Image: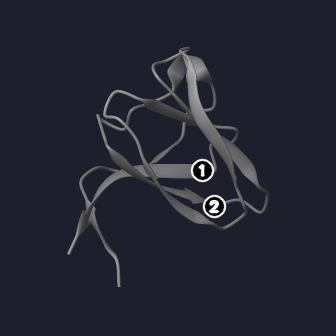
Amino acid sequence: MARSLLVGAEIPCPTSAGVATSFDGATVVRLVNTTNAAHKITVLEEQNGNGIGSMTMPAGSVEYVEKRAGYVIFAANAGVLGTRVGFTG
């Protein structure tokens, strides 16, 4: 069974590229879509920067996104929550 090491407070994802967050320099972010609709999340090199990738999170889903510490994330809806995590053995 996988376990998560919580190393930050859970916050609503920003909803635009200009305020996207790195989650305090996280290299792994746990995201949960708390809404009843699918929402897109996007990873950028920096705020308003080049896109690295994106994906759609189905309603009620949980994803772990691995990224470089300086990369930032935003979501199409603030109902997507994120927190900095690490993995334990």
Q: For the residue labelled by badge 2, is the local secondary structure a helix, a strand or a loop?
A: loop
- Locate residue 80, reporting x and y percent: 60, 50
The picture places residue 25, in percent across and down from the top left corner, at 29, 34
Q: For mark 1, what is the residue?
A: 80
The quarter of the picture where residue 58 lies is bottom right
Quarter of the image that includes the C terminus: bottom left
Among all residues in the image, which is located at the extreme right? 37
Amino acid residing under circle 2: Thr
Rendered residue at 73%/48% (across/down): 39
Q: Position of residue 72 (x, y in %)?
A: 45, 30
Residue at point 56%, 14% (across, down):
48
Q: Position of residue 88 (x, y in %)?
A: 21, 70
In percent of the image, x 52 and y 22: which residue is there? Answer: 19
| Residue drawn at the location 34% of the way across and 77% of the way down | 2
Q: Nearer the viewer, residue 30 or 52?
A: 52
Q: Earlier in the sequence, mark 1 or mark 2?
A: 2
Inspect the image, locate mark 1, and give the three-letter code of the amino acid beneath it: Val
Compared to 45, does 63 lie above or below?
Answer: below
Q: Secondary structure at mark 1?
A: strand
Say which of 38 and 64 sits in front.
64
Crowd around label 2: few <14 · some 14–19 · many ≥20 (10 Å): some
The dot on residue 34 is 2
Q: Quadrant of the N terminus?
A: bottom left
Label disc, if present, on residue 35 of the rendered structure:
none
Horizontal side, residue 5 vs residue 71: left or right: left
Cα–Cα gap, marks 1 and 2: 6 Å
Indicate the quadrant where residue 4 lies. Answer: bottom left
Q: Mark 1 and mark 2 in contact? Answer it, CB < 8 Å.
A: yes
Depicted 80 relative to depicted 59: above or below: above
Q: Is residue 30 left or right of residue 78?
A: left
Q: Is residue 76 left or right of residue 13?
A: right
